[in-house]
Amino acid sequence: MCIRDRLEGFVPEFTIYNAGESFADPTIPGLSSKTSVSINFKTHEQVILGTQYAGEMKKGILTVMFYLMPKRGHLCMHASANEGKSGDVTVFFGLSGTGKTTLSADPERKLIGDDEHVWTNDGVFNIEGGCYAKAIGLNPESEFEIWNAVRFGAVAENCTILQDTKAIDFYDESVCKNTRVAYPLNHIDNAKNIAVAGHPKNIIFLTNDAFGVMPPVSRLTQGAAMFWFVTGYTANVPGVVAGAANDPVPTFSPCFGGPFLVMHPTHYGKQLAEKMDLHNANCWLVNTGYAGGPATKGGKRMSLKVTRSLLDMIHDGSLERCKFVEYPGWGLQIPVSVKHKNVPDAILNPRNMWKDQTAYFSTLNTLARMFKKNFQARFEEKADDEMKAAVPKEITPSHI
């Protein structure tokens, strides 16, 4: 999971003690369970107790980088990145389940990395030497690059084996839903041999909006980019529990990496805004979630073909040349028409996909209130006026 090739003269500065089979003592002040992942910045040590999830090792080092890199003027990012044939770089931010790994593995672009990067004064580099992808439902039709990377030298976690073929059963959730595969970067055919690239041309925030009210693609101003970055929004669909409401649940994880941040989220937000401004980077919000209604009430998942087509338009510059209008109440700039065979114009404005307009406005405003409540509680005190202006507002049909 970390860089495999040791540089000449390199001396490791942090030591990871993975004792996941041993439990933490919850009676110790500061601990609330038998699981703990602790980092000591003075002794340069990480200790893992009570969890055998391999991702804790790499995320511990990500936390270290979130502490060290800002001190050097660099932005640490919980994000994937790839590079086009002309050297243009795209960075993808997104929480689990939004498609960060899937969308960065693009056959037309070189993969820089799928999860952890740093944006320096010279460009971006990958912290890791491989990828750590979700394995559930993995198949060659929808995610060939990742599926093809699972071969000798890869490691499968929480997966089971088919008895007749001895192949991995990517559809078996009997161990847990969070099945994973880890593989070196060189298992991706078009990955960069040296995972370093130039400054990003496009920044993409991915969200899996289970409420069904987010546009499939939106262009963000610098103030809106800071707001959506520090907010780190996605929404999940809870499992059905007897007697419980089966409604989407919003997740707000600052900078798309809340558990790993060491400084206040607005510090990283200002870093991002400064780098975007300095290097003239565009920022987009892409919804890989639902349209036409909430996920639990008839909404349909956004087609991967639609999402990939919009990303292609971002990369070739054609989307930026489209006509945009404001998505009322949210300050998002959405295209009126993209003239692409895979992207019907109706889907570009979420309102068009809802049959029940009363339910649409009710859901839209419910989510807006959730955004406002989260912002007031966590960020308003340290936010500037431009970021405050990007907070979603409730609207009625009369605003349209």
Image (cartoon, grey):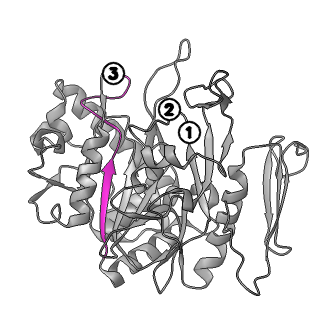
| Residue 294 sits inside the magenta stretch | yes
Magenta-tinted stretch: 281-297
Residue at 29% of width from left, 47% of height from top? 307
Up the image or down, 195 lies above or below 244; here it is below
Q: Quadrant of the N terminus?
A: bottom right
- Amino acid on which the number 3 mark rests in the picture: Lys
Whether residue 125 appears in this view of the structure is yes
Is 398 situated left or right of 378 in this image? Answer: left
Which residue corresponds to mark 1? 135
Which residue corresponds to mark 2? 137
Which residue corresponds to mark 3? 297
**Where in the figure is residue 360, as x and y percent of width and height?**
23, 31
Front-lying residue, 365 or 62: 62
Q: Quadrant of the C terminus?
A: top left
Front-lying residue, 284 or 263: 284
Residue at 68% of width from left, 59% of height from top? 58
**Where in the figure is residue 77, as x and y percent of width and height?**
52, 66
**Where in the figure is residue 284, as x and y percent of width and height?**
30, 60
Is 254 situated left or right of 319 in this image? Answer: right
Residue at 39% of width from left, 39% of height from top? 142
Q: Are marks 3 and 2 in contact (CB under 8 Å)?
A: no
- Amino acid on which the number 1 mark rests in the picture: Ala
Q: Residues within 10 Å of mark 1 (few under 14, many from 20)?
A: many
Element at label 2: loop
